[in-house]
Amino acid sequence: MLLINLFCVALIALIVWWFWLYKPKAATHQANNAIVVKDGVYSPARITVPANTATQLTFLRQDKAGCSASLLFPDLDISEELPLDKPVVISLPALAKGEYPFHCQMQMYKGVLLVE
Amino acid sequence: MNTQTTQLLIEGAGCASCVGKIEKALKTVAQVEQAEMNFADRSVMVTGEVEVASLLEAVEKAGYHAILINDQGGADAIDEKEQADAIYYKSLIKHTIVALAVGIPLMIYGLFIGDMTVTNPIQQLVWGAIGVLTLGIMFFSGKHFYTGAWKSFTHHSANMDTLIALGTGTAWVYSMVVVFAPDLLPEMARHVYFEATAMIIGLINLGLALEVKARGKTSAAIKRLIGLQAKTARVIRNGKAVDIDIALVQLNDKVSVRPGEKIPVDGVVVEGSSFIDESMLTGEPIPVEKSVNDDVVAGTLNKLGSLTFTATRVGKDTALAHIITMVKRAQNSKPPIGRMADVISSYFVPAMMIIAIISAMVWLNFGPEPSVGYAIVSAMTILIIACPCALGLATPMSVMVGVGKAAESGVLIRNGEALQTASTITTMILDKTGTITEGAPKITDILVVNGREEQQVLQLAASIEQHSEHPLAQAVVQAATDKGLTLFNVENFTAIAGFGVQAQYQSAQLLFGNEKLMREKGIALSDYQQQAQALAADAKTPMYFAIDGELAAVIAVADPIKADSVAAIARLKSSGIKVIMLTGDNHATATAVAAKVGVDDFFADVLPQDKAKKVAELQALGEVVGMTGDGINDAPALALANVGFAIGTGTDVAIESADITLMRGSLHGLADAIAVSKATLGNIRQNLVGAFIYNAAGIPLAAGVLFPVFGVLLNPVVAGAAMAFSSLTVVSNANRLRFFTPQQH
């Protein structure tokens, strides 16, 4: 039983680290490369763009789930509908350095725009 | 002309070698600076000052078909979305039927025969076969949950799929351990849960399918707006009328419209006259007469006459396209009330995984036998019932329906925050001119002094007022024009803000303005001051006209009160809002108008720059202030107010600047906006309370809080059904808003 309890505690620690503490590497956004919305995630989900430069991000939704159809950048007051299998270009203004999260309406699909 | 980047979707590009061909074709188009194609998503980005039609043509010539991406979200986009939803719905129903076809018989067996334990080799064989069949169900009907969960996991994120995959996966793995190695478990714990796995997958697929159907209805309003767009336009090219796709209409094209047809793009009438039904856009039921030099708006319906107009705004620049974009954006935004649910949702799934583990530990350490079985059931049920879908949907679904509902009544709400704040307004400020009144004043009385001739006085007064932009000045000029009087050229014209105007005609000094101006310039008003007060008491605005330092006439102007202002103000007051009128007019006129329309209070003689101060003063007293004006000269006050309501035609800058735009002139639009915002916020609260109760009550039940007293533990299949239908409940409740009708007027 002690072993099982220790295993459970370790599992809890793993969940905390994996979902909340771990910071995955960000992908530098390449112009013309779409951020694909598929299987419940944005790929890539952490995107780096340069600071103080207007940028365009292209999203391509290949996920049928209704939730994935809405894309929100709450800090930038941007919300867009993503039609299935059709790229949508989001024009971003020149942004100050910082982290700008984006997600679907229910926050099930989550990503971060890192302006560096 | 398009000065920005244009993105096209290319159809028919089947191989990578097409990329060079398409890029080359596009680069031959004049003004194209760059054309880069992304083969992965079949899109091409074109930069340069180009006409979209030329690009589409170039791609066609190269042997492919191009579609403009992200233009105005037209009817085609909606049709495609509906088709995609229909396909998704069918696949979900198919998955549901297959999973339930296995799950239901298994569950009936479990309920009525109850022997789902593995105690001998025959049972091992039978349940092993059922386990393999269930695995097939998991693969066929639940594959999307498992791939979604895995993808999400590799991205260090957890979602609804994670919970379903973990819950059903745990049940299946445990059951297979029971089948293959029952000796590892205590005898009482040798129970299989294949029916739970199949039923949960079936029920959640069913919930998703019904949700897809219900979601489609929430966007009915935007669909109706998009449906207003015409698909073709009849353009006059080389002297001939030709029908072309609406995307190909260019600025300054001459467009012809016959009776019963929709106006395809915005424009100015150059020939003909007709009545246009603008009701779907403005909520105004009476058709409006249009003739030469009048504006026409895309999406409105031409009734009887034929018109030719010059296109002034096309494609995504039309007022209708702006409105559609704005409504879509507002539908996707969230009011502050939803933020707490957002924060909870974003931490919810991993937190529920932790709670499920803790619950399992408690059962294993302190639970009765078979503790392993109870631990598995409890953890699985928590994972299944914990899904925060309903919580996440509670706010956006109501906002989507509420904003759409408002748009149907000609009320454009900018975002969720404006929607929420509008429901809490305690004081509403109404600008008088153009808001309560028609905004088109007319001369009612001319009292000439010392036997002067009325015609001559009016001619001189109009000559000076023709240079003023004040609405009252327009009434004087209009009266002179109506009488066929020729206006003189005056010199040294000066406008004195808030007072009036002065100028010189030949050797005569002309002065036109209010009482304050006359006093400042030392003009004696004698007996006429009393007569002016009498006019003011009758809701007319008296103005004084002086020639060479002597009063020449008192000219009274009245701005008629809109026919339905009184009823609309009564509606606002009946919803508990204090209504205050602001006007630059004198106190007597303001008193008379205030009494006629029944406002609670009013402020007269308010200069345009002081309107914002009044808003601030009321806010300092703790009032939540709504300000209603025409959106241009009231801009500072509109911006400062908690919610700014712009009354306008919806074709100008007001759409972009106001929190809420009332497309029709009637103040009933204001009362409708408040009523819709209150109904929507009420709906959001119901959804949030329902979703919170569902999770807050469901999780302890799943963990087994009732077990020590009542011996009851929530069945995972019941949890699966509850989870599946909780989202559906929220979406259906939001859909109820579609039937909300503001108080009739």
Image (spheres, coloured by chain):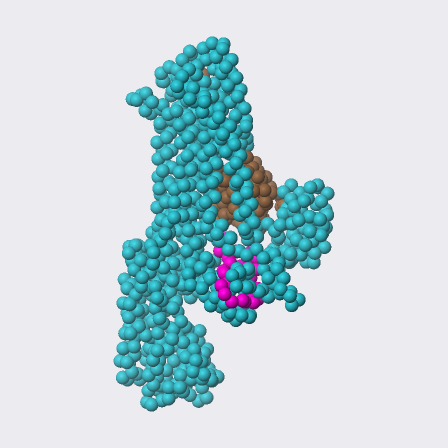
Chain colours: A brown, B cyan
Residue B310 falls inside the magenta stretch:
yes
Which residue is found at the position 40% from the left and 27% from the top? B718
Image quarter of the N terminus of chain B: bottom right
Lateral position of residue B47 relative to residue B561, left or right:
right
> Does any portion of residue B17 appear in the rendered image?
yes
How many numbered circles does the render carry?
0
Picture coordinates of residue B164, whole percent (x, y): 47, 29
Specify the segment rendered in magenta.
Answer: B298-325
Q: Is residue B135 above or below residue B524?
A: above
Image quarter of the C terminus of chain B: bottom left
> Does any portion of residue B621 appear in the rendered image?
no
Picture coordinates of residue B534, whole percent (x, y): 27, 77
Lateral position of residue B656 relative to residue B7, left or right:
left
Picture coordinates of residue B356, whole percent (x, y): 42, 26
Which residue is found at the position 39% from the left and 19% from the top? B112
- In depth, the one of B84 and B424 nearer the eye is B84
Residue B435 falls inside the magenta stretch:
no
Which residue is found at the position 39% from the left and 15% from the top? B370
Which residue is found at the position 59% from the left and 49% from the top? B69
- In depth, the one of B559 and B634 nearer the eye is B559
Q: Image quarter for residue B316?
A: bottom right
Lateral position of residue B247 relative to residue B168, left or right:
right
- In depth, the one of A24 and B347 nearer the eye is B347
Picture coordinates of residue B50, whole percent (x, y): 65, 57
Q: Is residue B726 above or below residue B312?
A: above
